[in-house]
Each structure stands twice: as structure tokens, then as C-alpha cells.
Image (cartoon, grey):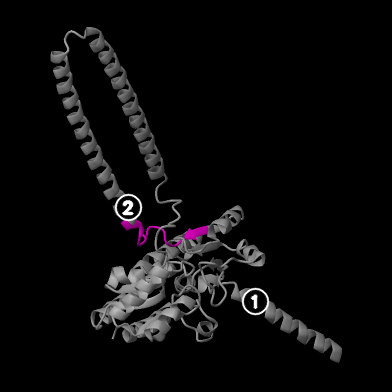
Amino acid sequence: MKTKSIFIAMMLVVFTFLVGCNSDNQASDGSEKLTVYTTIFPLEDFTKKIGGEHVDVKSVFPAGADAHTFEPSTKTMSEMASADAFIYTGVGVEGFADKAKGVLENEEVTIVAAGEGIELRGEEESHEEEHDHEHDEEAHEEEHDHEHDEEAHEEEHNHEHDEEAHEEEHDHEHEEGAHEEEHDHEHEEEAHEDEHNHENEEEHGDEHGEDGHEGHDHSNGDPHVWLDPTLSITLAENVKNALVELKPEAKEDFEANFETLKADLEKLDTEFKDTVDSAKTNKILVSHAAYGYWENRYGLEQISVNGLSPTQEPSQKQLTEIINTAKENEIQYVIFDQNISGKIAEVVQDEIKAEPLVLHNLEAATEKDVENEEDYFSLMRQNLETLKKALN
């Protein structure tokens, strides 16, 4: 009898555990939760905030990962392949994404590029340079044509003079005329080839244009769009739209949660503006050029030791220029990333006798962030406190 009671008790425990696991996988309305994998921390946080009880969100990145260099394990890829969706930025920061997309699409996982529709910093500048270059080429062609016209006029004048001076040399004139015709023919062929090449270039440009924004890997732009609260609204909206498509019956919840998130991002944007506008300087010295969107949005100027990727290290000449600029502007702080060691930035710090500070690039949460249950807004407000110290 006692044995039977123990058995029943054990069965009840197992049953309770199974029901608990099942309920964790279901929303309060009884529908099954969506399983979504994300990359950078803001996408994980936004998806949780927008999805609410309808979504089970997991990050591909382990605590403290560097988004630029991270590669998922085979086990992680296998788990992602069983998910409903994979949300990544699509702006060039996740090096593994293209390889992962091919695998996940075969498993019918919905792929969401949250950065779609965002014009990256740096891309617009390269477009302007390309446009200026085209204008320079047109001006050069006009100048070249004008020079040809002058040459042709001089040749005609010289030819008339030669005819008057050497009328008796009829045979020589005949040979010269034949030579000129041959020369003109060669010029016509060259012009034809130039025209053909120009048409090919235009055709190639049209083909590139027809590809459009879709499929563009943003490899020349600054991928750190999530650090701009205003651009983060676009990221969040793309996440919301994807969730609505995956689970239309929860549309009202997704829309309401997005509007709350949007209002919070707009408030954060105002806080950043106020912080920079009231500061004594607008210059910061950073180890990694992750904060360019603050330059565009708020008028900050980042002096960066490394490039857009932490692996883009400066030359000796560039390093000397950075140190000189920091000294000229009497910069007292060197700002490091929370997840990247900056050996060269430490050299700069020692050279200018600066105090180290930390800005959170939000690529991935640290173990401490997870323990403290930090979210996008708490980490960004920590960044605001760092900026207040660095700018005043």
C-alpha cells in the first residue's frame, strides 16, 4: 500500500512537471508560442517586448560575444533550424548570417532582416562620391572633346597652308589625304569602341540597379544602427510586422506592444539630445568606431582608434595622428567597449594619460547584464551617464 502511494505521488510530480513545461510553451489563450532566434541584444529585447506572451525568444549569441566574429556551433544551428523565425540585423554585422540563411531557408524558417529600409551611415557618402565622380568624368569628356575640336581646327588650317605652299606636290597630297582618311577611320573605330564600352558600363549599372536594395549586403556601411533610438524604431517595426505575419491572431497585442516600445525609444532619443546639447564638448575618444550614428543624430564627434570592426587597426601614422588630436583637444578619457579588449587603445590611453571609461555597444549582453536583468533602455541610459562624464 505504501509502495502504491509513493508511485502515485511520483506520477503526480511527473505529470505536474510535464504540464508546466507544456504551459511554458503556450500563451494564456492556449495557442502555441512562436520560437524565435535573434542575434544582437537589442533584437532579442525588442522581440521579447513586442512578442510578449506569444513568443519564446532565444539569442544566438552567448554572453559577451563579439557580433563581428561570432560563429554558431553545429548544435546551435540545429536548434535554430527547428525555430519559427530567425531575426538578424541584415546590415552586415553578423558575419555568419549568409551561411546560416541558406541552411534555415531549407528548413522553412522565416528569415527576418530587421534593418531593411535603413540607409546606413557611409553608404550615402559613397553614393555622393560616385555622383561627383560621374560629374568629373563628364567635365573631363567635354574638355577632351573641346581639345579635339581645337586640334581638328589647327590641322585644317595647317592643311590649307600646306596646299597653298605645295600645290605642285600632287602625289604627296594624295598620299597625305589617304593617310588622314585612315587616321580618321581609326578615330571613328576608337570612338565606336568607347561608345560600346560606355554602353556596357551603363548596362552593368542598370543590372546593379535592378537588383535593388534587396540582396545588398551593406558591406560599406556602418552596421551599428541599433545605437540610434530613432533607427531602432525601424528595427522594432520590422520585428513587429514579421510577428504579425507569423501569428496574425495576436496582431492587436503586437501592435500595442510596439507602440509602447516606440514611445520609449522616442523618449530616449530626447534624453540623448539633451545630454549632448548641454555638454561642454562634443568630442569623444573611443577604441572602436561604433558610435557614428550619434555623430549624425546628435552632433557628437568620435575620434576612433579602431575602425567599424575592432579588427581594423590603425597604421603607425594614423595612431600618431589620433594621439596628437586627443592632446590638441585635451581629451581626458578613452572609452572602451564592454566586450572587446582594446590593446592599441590602451597605448593611446597611456600616451595621453587618460582615464578609461566604458560604453556598451549592445551587440551582446554580458553575464552581469543577464544577472541584473538589464534591457536595452537600462544599458543605453548607462551609456548616457558615461557620455555625461566624457563630455563635461
Q: Is residue 159 above or below residue 81?
A: above
Which of the 4 image quarters holds residue 240? bottom left
Which of the 4 image quarters holds residue 385? bottom left
The residue indicated by pointer 2 is 127
Q: Which residues are magenta?
A: 111-125
Please identify the quadrant where the N terminus is shown.
bottom right
Q: How many marks?
A: 2
**Secondary structure beneath disc 1?**
helix
The residue indicated by pointer 1 is 21
Amino acid carrying label 2: it is His
Residue in the picture at 18% in, 7% down: 168
Q: Position of residue 143 (x, y in %)?
A: 21, 38
10 Å neighbourhood of mark 1: few (<14), some, or many (≥20)? few
Residue in the picture at 40% in, 84% down: 382
Amino acid carrying label 1: it is Cys
Residue in the picture at 81% in, 89% down: 5
User: In this view of the protein, which residue sits in the foreground, 246 or 42?
Assistant: 42
Please identify the quadrant where the C terminus is shown.
bottom left
**Secondary structure beneath disc 2?**
helix
- Rounded to the nearest angstrom, the CA distance separating label 2 from label 1 is 53 Å
